[in-house]
Each structure stands twice: as structure tokens, then as C-alpha cells.
Image (cartoon, rainbow, N blue to C red):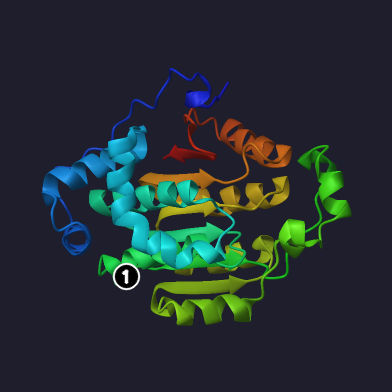
Amino acid sequence: MIGISSRNPKAQPQQAWTSERLSSSTTTLLRSGMRRLPIPRYWRWLAQSALIGLHGKQQAVRRRRVLAPSVTKVRAYSMLPETELVLLGDHVLALLSEGLPGAFVECGVWRGGSAFLMADLLRRAHVHDRKVWLFDSFEGLPEPKEIDGRAVSAYAAEKDSPANYYNCSASLEEVKETARHLELAPYTECVKGWFAQTLPSTRERVGPIALLRIDADWHDSVRCCLDQLYDQVVPGGLITFDDYYIWEGCTIAIHEFLGERRLATPLYQRGKTVYLRK
């Protein structure tokens, strides 16, 4: 059985993220954001803490100090609480520090906040050879199915209410305008349509993937993202899931995929985010 390592509160992921050298892009970011800290030592600590789950007030303050400008910039465009945005930023910085190649991809973007956070960190690190891909229908969520769990009936009954963010819908024009307003358009590319149509036709252009963030809610959507993009995630890359504990269909899709591929890949949890390292 494939389980989540941190369901045991005493268990922490044991695989540390180690890096002997810093990329020039991450060094640039730290010089601009953390002038008073020793760059190599701090960056190695940050990369390790992002993936092995180091906690404590001092560590959290240091991480947030680096990420604060970007988190503040995008906060209004995301459903995620600040703590989850900080975790996403941790992962991006760790991948940049390791020097892993590949794009950053989000499937299910709403107003773009999470993707814009990744893009802003690329901008601050002066990374120009990759970008963030935003895949979404930009028309809201598709209809859920029975496999998505008992709770979906209540959601479906009020899916267009403000409490459900009008079925998690935001127009393509709105997201593109926000990217321009935040000066992140050069670092992002939006792809409109249902995943089953857009992912197969676009994945060659995307190329290798360093981080794949799946916020697709329903079973069929999550499974489509994994089927179409998992093989493009580079060794050492990350796949993060937003809805593992929210919708049963998402949970089923993840374990179903790993089981069919016979992948004994641990799932880790920090905050509300569940992720795996390929």
C-alpha cells in the first residue's frame, strides 16, 4: 500500500534535498532578498527545509522573509492561505537551488495566484530560460462524478455561489490582464480548454517539468494530468496535490495511478499540501 509518510505525526520525510553548488539564479535572488545572511549556508538550509519539513519559529521566519514580497504580490489572486503559498515558494526555491531543469506547470489555476507566485520567483531569480504554464478551462470546473465522493452533491447544488467562487471560474482575459499588471506575462503562458484536449496537444511544447502542481479537484481531471504529464517530470522533480484531503476522487486518482504504474513512491504532507518527489 502506498501511504502518506506524515500521517504518523512522528514520521517525517527522510530524503533530504542536498546540493553542493548554488545556481547563479538562486544566488542572485538571495543577494537581492537576504543581503544580511551568508548566502551559501542559508540557501542550503532553505533547500533542505523545504523538502524534509524542518519546522520551528526561526526557520519559518527566515523562509517567509525571502518569500514575503512574492506572496504579498499574489495573495489576492489565490484561494490558498499564506502558509500554503509559502510552502509552494519553498518548493520552487529548492528546485532552483538544485538546478533541476524544466518548466513549472499548474493544472487548475483559478485567478492564477499560485502560478504567479512561481513566476515571480523566476523573475526575481533572473531565470529567463523557462516559464510557468497555466492550464485551465477558464470556465469553471467540469461536472463531478459519483467517484468524487459523497460531498460533491452539496457542492454541485451550490457550485455557482460566491462561497464556491462561482464554480472556481475566472476568465482567460482576467488572468492574462493580471499577469500583465504584475509584470509577469513574459514568465507565463496560459492554455485554455479541458485537460483531455489541451494536455496531449501542448505537452511537447511544455517539455521537461521541474514542478507539476495539480489543483484539478475531480478524479477524471487529476488522473488526466498524471497520465499526460507524469512522464515529463524530471527525476527529482515534484508533483504537488491541492485536493488530496478535500475530494475523494482526487485521492483515488493518485493511488490508482501509482498502483497501475507499480510505483512505490512515498507521498509526503506539509500543511494541507500532499506531494511526491519523482
Image quadrant containing the C terminus:
top left
Q: Is residue 21 visible?
A: no
- The three-letter code of the residue at mark 1 reads Arg
Q: Position of residue 26 (x, y in %)?
A: 22, 58
Vertical order, 127 against 181 (above or below): above
At x 64% / y 36%, what residue is drawn? 245
Judging depth in this view, the residue of 219 and 259 nearest the camera is 219
- Horizontal side, residue 240 vs residue 159: left or right: left
Name the residue beneath numbered marker 1. Answer: 123
Judging depth in this view, the residue of 210 and 52 nearest the camera is 52
- Horizontal side, residue 176 vs residue 194: left or right: left
Q: Position of residue 165 (x, y in %)?
A: 72, 61
- Horizontal side, residue 120 vs residue 200: left or right: left
Q: Position of residue 122 (x, y in %)?
A: 33, 65
Helix, strand or loop at label 1? It is helix
- Horizontal side, residue 18 vs residue 235: left or right: left
Within 10 angstroms of label 1, few (less than 14), some, or many (20 or more) residues? some
Image quadrant containing the N terminus:
top right
At x 40% / y 66%, what residue is drawn? 119
At x 34% / y 50%, what residue is drawn? 64
Vertical order, 227 against 199 (above or below): above
